[in-house]
Image (cartoon, helix red, strand yellow):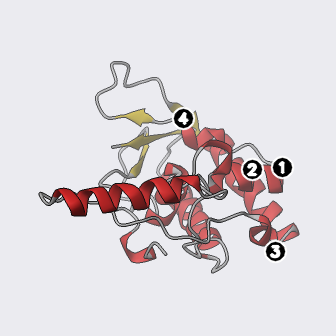
Amino acid sequence: MISFLNLNFFGMDYYIKANVETNCKDDFPSGLSFFFEQVGGFDEKSMVSQVEKILKIDLSTFQDYDFDGEENPNKHWKNINAFERTIDDLLLKIKGNPNYYKKVKFNPIDPPEYGFSSDKKEMETMKQKQREYEKSPMFGFPSDNEYLSSNRFTSDLNKLKNILKCYKKHGATKIKLSYY
């Protein structure tokens, strides 16, 4: 199982920025960052896609972000109220379907250890374990890090709402998500 404490070991994270300067604590919650990165799940098998289908909600606004080095830095600004409504809608749908996470499919097999070795036999063993893992019928589904079932997801959504409230208090009308 992926340790929740080490979710962002990949080195990439979501960031949030307001269109005005503030003194708000604006750390995009790391659990949400991991969730929206879709690490461990692919396409429609990712937690994000599964949650969208189960709760019948469009979360694509979280996939519209500025990637480090983009040529048009003004491209991804969103209306702060519309963004907040998406979060509110998601929280309402979760409240109305509190066991939604039980419908999310997870891969019961932890992915094999990744790494490199100068020992050819050891490298071949790692490659063989990966090939076997990829043959699993649940390949492409994420491991269950208990993010949804532990309510950390809703807690992080509320933290994000508090960031937005602080931004609005300082006059922000737009936000931008960045990923790098």
Between marks 4 and 3, how big is the CA–CA gap? 28 Å
Using the image as rendered, state which of residue 20 and residue 93 is in the foreground: 93
- Identify residue for label 4: 64
Amino acid marked by disc 1: Lys
- Identify residue for label 2: 52
- Identify residue for label 3: 99
Between marks 4 and 1, how big is the CA–CA gap? 19 Å
Please indicate, yes or no, whether residue 55 appears anywhere in the rendered image. yes
- Identify residue for label 1: 56
**Contact check, label 4 and label 2, Cβ < 8 Å:** no
Using the image as rendered, state which of residue 146 and residue 61 is in the foreground: 146
Mark 2 residue element: helix
**Contact check, label 2 and label 1, Cβ < 8 Å:** yes
Farthest-out residue, right: 96
Mark 3 residue element: loop
Choose top left, top right, bottom left or bottom right for residue 115: bottom left
Q: Where residue 18 sits in the image (x, y, percent)?
A: 44, 44
Q: In this view, does 59 lie above or below 143?
A: above
Label whose residue precedes the other's in the sequence (4 or 1): 1
Mark 1 residue element: loop
